[in-house]
């Protein structure tokens, strides 16, 4: 008893305390309720007075109602009270509105009804918009963001309805102008852009953006272009170009001009910008894209300056910059194939097979040596001075290869001296007059490789190679033809066309010569839609006999034709129609190649679906068109990250359900999607396929492991390939593929990339993509092409090889070391404020390497970069406002 009493007494004060705040809350609620009640009664009175016969009373009631609604619309976390309490009266006010005579008061009521419709109108009625158009012309923003946003949604629906009915839309456009001005003023540029896209009036945007928000607007426009169907994507980029030009953000404007492939715009950027230093930066951007572009007096009046600019566009400084990077990172020491194979890390059985000095293994070593020492000018096989030990002396390595192997060996000199034309030509010179045709052919191809991406006014490649085009020996001819194709890729050089087109129509020319001529023309005129070349290629295809159409090399003919339309979308249609008249053996194959090239890098969803549909068919033996369809899927989807991930998933389905001819192409498609960007899940898939029971699938997977790791030195892939070399030590073909893949992974000792995309994935270089596409199509039938006597097709990858560097230079274009932060790029499109663009960064001094998905920013205020995207060569100018901290 006692204890209970105790409990009670001890508990009492606490209980009282607890009750106390409760009563306060109750009071608060009561106050709120009484306030609400007062507001409710107040509004009801206004509603009654609004229906008064006296206009003055009506106006006062509506003004007060409007005041109440406006003051409450500021927060949008819950439905504002006035709107809640006016709900029951919405219908009353609506029906009263119908009876009112036209007057200012009626417009006032329409405004209020428009706001009330925000919460009350039925879905799809668009009453908010209806009353807005009937109401006064007042400031639209004063009703709050949510109202404006709702109105924008209704306008989009109404607009598409009126366009279908061909009704007048002027009143809507006026309203759109108000809404856009409101959005832009309140930092909601993406919403303004979305609304204008819906109503197809994007041009209105240009006058609304100003210095403070043009960058955000431009970024949103350029990013959304990847997700829009044609031709909207182009018109959006045009608007972005106009905006950037308006605010003199020329480097961005130039990048958009290149994305549109509009040379008039490129010219306009040069003529609008007076500053020579900035023009030099433009030239570096053009050189990276691989566009051949001639400057004229209008773009740069002074002859000396123009010459200096043209030199940058011609890429003559690339070798110098690359070697500066190599010296800085201390990787100048030449590497031998053994340094790459690292056979000592494996158990006994692999190295046992390696003792055999077979021609096949020497050929593999030739390629590995060429890829690893690419551009360094020295190696341990080809450029060793002749007074050193007998086995390594100069001529010997070439003659350790058999027949056509010597071609690749001689050509590898061109790869080792990549981009350094003078040295390369001097070293190749002695092989031109060799008695062995294969060696001469290799030297000719080497000339093409060394000149790849470098242009020169005196055209050394053309002068050297032209004489060999009509030699008797077909291997020499092919060497010269491929050399021209590589040296002049993307230049649309008419002399080359005049020299190569007759070969296509020559009835005596063997098939391989014709096939490589088609590829060379496709490369020189890549993405040009040139009708004369297209016609010559179509005739060459039609002239092929039944037996020739069964040959693997014949597939390179439609590919040459496809390259003419690379990335040009609809322009291919006429040619695609013509291709339907070809022999049925190649008709479908040609169709797939034309479509896949024309839509390469566009991310066009409909085309991806089309290719998937083609892959779903189950075929009789002998049909080969599904190979290009699978590659087409990758070519179209590689443009942006989202489509890329979806394509990888689709390809995994194809692996499970596809037939053999699809399964052997899937690894190649994965290799293209993740080129020089080793994603772990793709790496695992390829590793699994590299042990596949089907040798062709395994070979494709091994080559693709090399492609996704190209130039990354990725340790995990290097380990996988080492293990594969011991797994396949008895199988010559697969071992050859493993070696080639090892060469790819350590390409340029880890300083190069094969990715055709650059400038933060905004641009893709057509020549780089063309080189990869040719290589992958050759890999569709490895036994006949890459493992047969045409292994030099592997050198076509040179078109895509670029240093993945950031090299900062001063105003005299001399390398300048500054601190930069390098980290993973972050997508900041449409984010408010000034979000950080990179995450997890480290600070380095330039020159630095940029891996896939990395972005750099300057870590000092001392200099201003002349390009907004820090990749490749970037000119820095001193910041006049910079003060050293005391």
Image (spheres, rainbow, N blue to C red):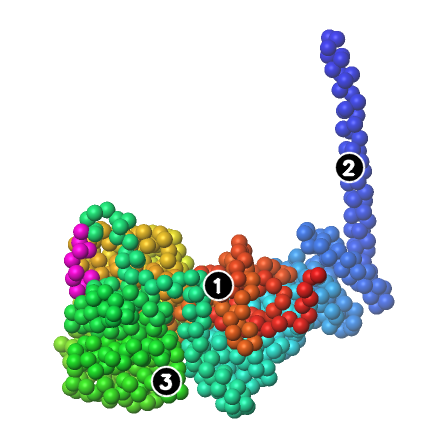
Q: Label 3, on which residue? A: 492
Q: Label 1, on which residue? A: 848
Q: CA distance from mark 2 to mark 3?
A: 82 Å
SS for dot 1: strand
Quadrant location, the N terminus: top right
Q: Is residue 569 above or below residue 664?
A: below
Given contact means CB atoms under 8 Å apart, are the residues at marks 2 and 1 in contact? no
**x and y percentages locating residue 61 in the rendered image:** 82, 61
Quadrant housing residue 712: bottom left
Name the mark nearer the viewer: 2 or 1: 1
Given contact means CB atoms under 8 Å apart, are the residues at marks 2 and 3 in contact? no
Residue 360 is one of the magenta-drawn residues: yes
Left or right: residue 205 versus residue 261 is right
Q: Main secondary structure of the magenta part?
A: helix
Q: Residue at x 32, y 62 (%)?
A: 335
* Labels 2 and 3: the sequence-earlier one: 2
Q: Residue at x 76, y 12 (%)?
A: 5
CA neighbours of label 1 inside 10 A, class few (<14), some (14 to 19), many (20+): many
Q: Label 2, on which residue? A: 25
Q: Residue at x 23, y 86 (%)?
A: 469
Range of the magenta residues? Answer: 352-361
CA neighbours of label 2 inside 10 A, class few (<14), some (14 to 19), many (20+): few
CA neighbours of label 3 inside 10 A, class few (<14), some (14 to 19), many (20+): some
**x and y percentages locating residue 472 in the rendered image:** 16, 85
Q: Residue at x 61, y 63 (%)?
A: 860
Which label belongs to residue 424? none
Of the pair 770 and 376, the residue shown nearer to us: 376
* Labels 1 and 3: the sequence-earlier one: 3
**x and y percentages locating residue 691 in the rendered image:** 24, 52
* Labels 2 and 1: the sequence-earlier one: 2
């Amino acid at each position: 008893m006692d204890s209970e009493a105790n409990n009670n007494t001890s508990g009492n004060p606490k209980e009282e305390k607890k009750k106390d705040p409760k009563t306060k809350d109750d009071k608060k609620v009561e106050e709120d309720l009484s306030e609400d009640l007062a507001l409710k009664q107040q509004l009801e009175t206004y509603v009654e007075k609004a229906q008064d016969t006296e206009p003055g009373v009506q106006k006062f009631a509506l003004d007060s109602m409007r005041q109440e609604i406006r003051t409450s619309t500021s927060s949008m976390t819950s439905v504002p009270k006035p709107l809640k309490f006016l709900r029951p009266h919405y219908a009353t006010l609506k029906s009263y509105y119908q009876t009112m005579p036209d007057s200012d008061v009626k417009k006032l009521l329409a405004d209020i009804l428009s706001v009330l419709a925000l919460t009350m109108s039925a879905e799809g009625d668009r009453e908010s918009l209806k009353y807005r158009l009937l109401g006064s012309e007042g400031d639209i923003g004063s009703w709050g963001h949510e109202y404006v946003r709702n109105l924008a949604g209704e306008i989009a629906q109404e607009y598409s309805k009126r366009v279908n009915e061909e009704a007048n839309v002027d009143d809507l456009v006026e309203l759109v102008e108000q809404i856009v001005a409101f959005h832009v003023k309140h930092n909601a540029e993406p919403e303004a852009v979305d609304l204008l896209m819906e109503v197809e009036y994007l041009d209105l945007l240009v006058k609304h953006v100003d210095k403070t928000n043009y960058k955000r607007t431009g970024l949103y426009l350029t990013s959304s272009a990847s997700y829009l169907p044609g031709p909207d994507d182009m018109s959006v980029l045009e608007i972005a170009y106009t905006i950037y030009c308006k605010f003199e953000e020329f480097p961005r404007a130039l990048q958009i001009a290149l994305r549109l492939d509009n040379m008039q715009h490129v010219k306009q950027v040069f003529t609008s910008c007076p500053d020579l230093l900035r023009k030099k930066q433009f030239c570096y951007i053009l050189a990276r894209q691989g566009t051949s572009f001639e400057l004229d007096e209008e773009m740069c009046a002074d002859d000396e300056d123009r010459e200096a600019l043209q030199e940058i566009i011609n890429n003559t400084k690339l070798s110098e910059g690359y070697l500066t990077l190599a010296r800085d990172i201390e990787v100048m020491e030449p590497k031998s194939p053994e340094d790459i194979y690292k056979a000592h890390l494996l158990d006994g059985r692999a190295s046992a097979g390696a003792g055999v000095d077979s021609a096949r293994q020497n050929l593999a070593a030739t390629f590995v040596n060429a890829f690893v020492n690419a551009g360094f000018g020295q190696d341990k096989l080809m450029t060793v001075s002749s007074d050193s030990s007998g086995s390594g002396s100069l001529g010997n390595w070439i003659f350790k290869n058999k027949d056509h192997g010597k071609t690749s060996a001689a050509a590898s000199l061109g790869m080792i001296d990549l981009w350094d034309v003078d040295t390369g030509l001097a070293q190749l010179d002695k092989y031109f007059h060799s008695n062995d045709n294969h060696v001469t052919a290799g030297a000719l191809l080497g000339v093409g490789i060394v000149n790849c991406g470098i242009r020169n006014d005196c055209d050394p490649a053309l002068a050297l190679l032209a004489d060999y085009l009509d030699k008797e020996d077909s291997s020499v001819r092919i060497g010269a033809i491929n050399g021209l194709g590589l040296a002049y890729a993307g230049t649309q050089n008419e002399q080359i066309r005049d020299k190569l087109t007759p070969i296509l129509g020559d009835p005596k020319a063997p098939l391989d010569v014709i096939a490589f001529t088609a590829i060379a023309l496709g490369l020189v005129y890549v993405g040009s839609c040139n009708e004369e070349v297209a016609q010559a290629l179509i005739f060459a295809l039609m002239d092929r006999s039944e037996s020739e159409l069964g040959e693997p090399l014949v597939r390179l003919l439609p590919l040459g034709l496809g390259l003419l339309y690379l990335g040009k979308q609809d322009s291919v249609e006429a040619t695609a129609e013509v291709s339907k008249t070809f022999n049925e053996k190649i008709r479908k194959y040609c169709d797939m190649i034309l479509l896949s090239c024309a839509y390469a890098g566009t991310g066009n969803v409909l085309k991806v679906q089309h290719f998937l549909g083609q892959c779903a068919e189950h075929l009789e033996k002998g049909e080969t068109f599904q190979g290009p369809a699978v590659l087409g899927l990758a070519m179209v989807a590689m443009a942006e990250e989202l489509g890329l991930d979806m394509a990888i998933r689709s390809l995994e389905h194809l692996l499970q359900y596809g037939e053999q001819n699809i399964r052997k192409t899937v690894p190649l498609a994965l290799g293209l999607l993740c080129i020089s960007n080793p994603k772990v899940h793709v790496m695992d898939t390829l590793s699994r396929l590299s042990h596949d029971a089907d040798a062709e699938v395994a070979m494709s997977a091994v080559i693709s492991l090399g492609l996704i790791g190209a130039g990354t030195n990725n340790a995990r892939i290097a380990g996988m390939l080492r293990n594969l070399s011991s797994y396949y030590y008895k199988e010559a073909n697969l071992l050859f593929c493993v070696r080639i893949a090892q060469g790819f992974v350590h390409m340029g000792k880890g300083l190069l990339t094969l990715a055709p995309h650059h400038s933060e994935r905004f641009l893709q270089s057509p020549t780089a993509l063309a080189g990869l596409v040719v290589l992958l199509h050759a890999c569709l039938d490895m036994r006949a092409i890459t493992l047969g006597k045409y292994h030099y097709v592997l050198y076509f990858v040179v078109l895509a090889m670029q240093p993945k560097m950031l090299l900062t230079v001063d105003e005299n274009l001399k390398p300048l070391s500054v601190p930069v932060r390098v980290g993973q790029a972050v997508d900041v499109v449409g984010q408010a404020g000034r979000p950080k663009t990179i995450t997890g960064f480290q600070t380095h001094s330039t020159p630095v390497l940029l891996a896939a998905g990395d972005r750099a920013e300057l870590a000092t205020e001392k200099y201003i970069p002349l390009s907004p995207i820090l990749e490749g060569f970037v000119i820095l100018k001193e910041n006049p406002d910079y003060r050293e901290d005391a």
